[in-house]
Amino acid sequence: MQDIGPAALAERDAAITTLREIFGLRGYDRAETPILEQTELYIRKSGGALSSKLYGFSEPGGLDVSLRPEFTSAILRQVANTTASDSQIRIMYDGPVFRYARLEDADGDKTRQFTQLGAEMIGAPAPSADGEIIAMALEGLEALGITGGRVVVGHVGVVLDALAEFKLSERAKLFLINSIGELKSGEIEAVSNKATALGFITEVVVDDAKAAADRERIASTIEQVLAEGMGVQFGKNTGVRTPAEIVARLSRKMSQVDNPDDFKKAFEMLAKLSQVSGPASIALEQGAAILSAAGISANLITNLSEILKSAEIEGVSNDRLSIDFGMARGIAYYTGMLFDIYLDDDQSETLGGGGRYDGLTRALGYDYDVPSLGFAYNLDSVIAVVESSGGPSQTTTLISPESGESIASAVAKAKVLRASGQRAAIEFQNSSEGQGA
């Protein structure tokens, strides 16, 4: 963690003021959330991905709490608690966030406290709303004088829908989803070895009769546990399903046996799709071809194509958009489009990112879904780019009392400059003025 001096703080404040004005013109209003929240809020939101980065502890009352690592979940909680679920809300925010990192981690050289500034659009469906968010991300950079902003777009929904075409268990799909980053890097053999060790890739023939028997046995066990009151409770958000339907669903998920051939086909499809990236038109064509070769309708990519068109309608040129089907950041959290923001073609460090998270309200414990999306800048990284681009700097005019003139005269001159909007200060000097002889 670092101190921030007057000059750096002034630059950050100026950037925040500019971005608030830009977002405000689009109808976004400011909101604040606590710096300290119950840890469960972030665990629910991220599926555990942030758990190793939380600054968490038990407060005097016994609650497990954490310094906020991001804003989205708290903003969504605030809106869900105060607004009708069918409303469309635009919120912007800024403030410090905290993420722990070990020195040996990929981001181990970064500060553990940094400033986020972002916006969330809650209650807005795709694809037009997605185009607005992408355009805003670039528009804000341009307002700060950064003209080389680029957006790399992925789409979790395409991956999830493609995997749904194969008869896979939830466990198998989760394994494949969590392996996207490795597959994108070309570590196909390593992932294959893991899948074999976990039993997904095997030469054993699936016995449907045995799978059915397993489901019956597991269902019986679940019913017995519930009947004997062993502390097992259904969550409050079970919807309209009956206890019998819930038991059947649990037993089916727990006993589902994956067909090795189906898993291999899904694995091969995802290994190819995750490595597709580049200009939008080319990547869309390549992605569609891979899905078609796997026997999956290329129409799954339609939503992504429409999102890119909506961004173009907002004024984003094609050369500032590219696609990466292997984007894996926060994949357990996002449900549709997701994107990262870079400067020019340098993808070594992001300036920010965001995406769509339509299922987050339910993950946070509410009994309904709300179509939502947003993004946030790492404002410290953005300001570093502004500085390197020769951004505006403020100078202060120092006024020294001239020989034979009083401090009062210098003060009067400083007031005149300040009245015209210029920074002015008195350069006080050691002298005998005002001292008796």
Image (cartoon, grey):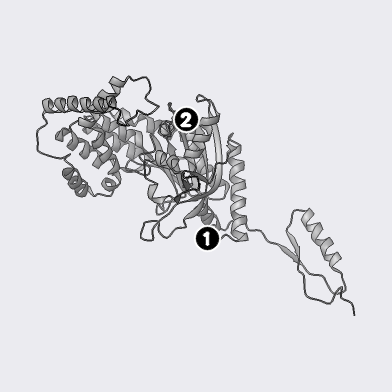
Label pair 1/2, CB-CB below 8 angstroms? no
> What residue sits right under mark 1 in the picture?
2
Residue 115 image point, x, y percent: 52, 51
Q: Is residue 147 above or below residue 199?
A: below
Percent across and percent down for residue 41 are: 45, 40
Q: Is residue 343 visible?
A: no
Where is 371 relative to 61, above or below?
A: above
Please state which of residues 284 and 74 is positioned toward the viewer in this rendering: 74
Q: Which residue is mark 2?
A: 128
| Mark sitting on residue 159 | none
Report x, y in % for residue 228. 27, 27
Whether residue 428 is visible, yes or no, is yes
SS assignment at label 2: helix
Q: Nearer the viewer, residue 176 or 143?
A: 176
| Above or below for 308 versus 110 | above
Q: Which residue does the image show at 50% across and 39% down from the upper left?
A: 74
Q: Residue at x 75, y 61 (%)?
A: 424
Residue situated furthest front in the rendering:
228
Task: Give the total number of marks visible in the rendering.
Answer: 2
Around disc 2, counting alpha carbons within 10 Å, would you say few (fewer than 14), some (14 to 19), or many (20 or more)? Answer: some
Residue 97 position within the rendered picture, expressed as x and y whole percent measured from the top left = 50, 49
- Type of the residue with mark 1: Gln
Task: Tell me the residue at 52%/31% (across/down).
Answer: 81
Judge left or right: residue 265 versus residue 144.
left
Helix, strand or loop at mark 1? loop
Q: Is residue 165 left or right of residue 111?
A: left
**Disc 1 or 2, which lies upstream in sequence?**
1
CA gap, disc 1 and disc 2: 40 Å
Q: Is residue 281 left or right of residue 190?
A: right
In this view, the residue in front, 401 or 300, is 401
The amino acid type found where label 2 is placed reads Ser
